[in-house]
Image (tube, rainbow, N blue to C red):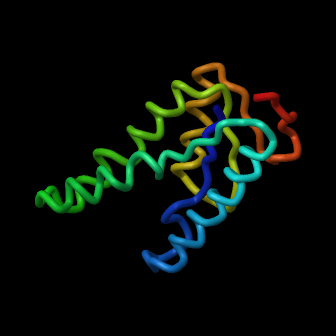
Amino acid sequence: MILVAGPYRSGTDGDPERIQANVDAMTRISLELYRRGHLPVMGEWFALPLIEAAEGEGAGDGAFDAIFHPIAEAVLARCDACLRIGGPSAGADQMIATARALGKRVFTDVAEIPGAAR
């Protein structure tokens, strides 16, 4: 399993279309990893539905901070490696620091990752 870490809100000024473009970029790389025999994961896949549910219950803006990065770190703890993509992002950089602290392999280009047999 490889966690794909890239910008989510960074550089978007909160523009939903630019945020979606960031998610789309991570999703495209995830598909490429899958086609190469790996199981890709994104923290967004786990966190965003939970954040939406919490906000629906009235948790407000604090739901994002309470859920987004903690979920990604929990997923990363179960991964074999982390792939950092995209531009500047404090959150994605934190995922890389966490991956290194956990002794995980860190990649910065999908081409560095060998194919895997399923």
Q: Where does the image place residue 30, in percent across and percent down from the top left?
A: 67, 50
- Viewer-nearest residue: 116 or 94: 116
Location of residue 113 with respect to 26 vertically, above or below: above
Numbered marks: total: 0
Location of residue 10 with respect to 99 vertically, above or below: below
Q: Is residue 1 left or right of residue 67?
A: right
* Residue at x-position 42% and y-position 44%: 69
Q: In which quarter of the image is residue 7?
A: bottom right
- Viewer-nearest residue: 80 or 40: 40
Q: Where does the image place residue 11, in percent across and percent down from the top left?
A: 56, 71
Location of residue 80 with respect to 63 vertically, above or below: above
| Picture quarter with the N terminus | top right
Q: Where does the image place residue 87, in percent across and percent down from the top left?
A: 68, 62
Q: Quadrant of residue 83?
A: top right
* Residue at x-position 65% and y-position 19%: 103
| Picture quarter with the C terminus | top right
* Residue at x-position 29% and y-position 54%: 51
Location of residue 8 with respect to 18 vertically, above or below: above
Extreme left residue here? Answer: 58
Q: In this view, does 109 lie to the left or right of 31?
A: right
* Residue at x-position 53% and y-position 65%: 10
Q: Quadrant of residue 14?
A: bottom left
Extreme front residue here? Answer: 118
Q: In this view, does 52 lie to the left or right of 60?
A: right
Q: In this view, does 4 lie to the left or right of 114?
A: left
Q: Where does the image place residue 97, in percent across and percent down from the top left?
A: 60, 34
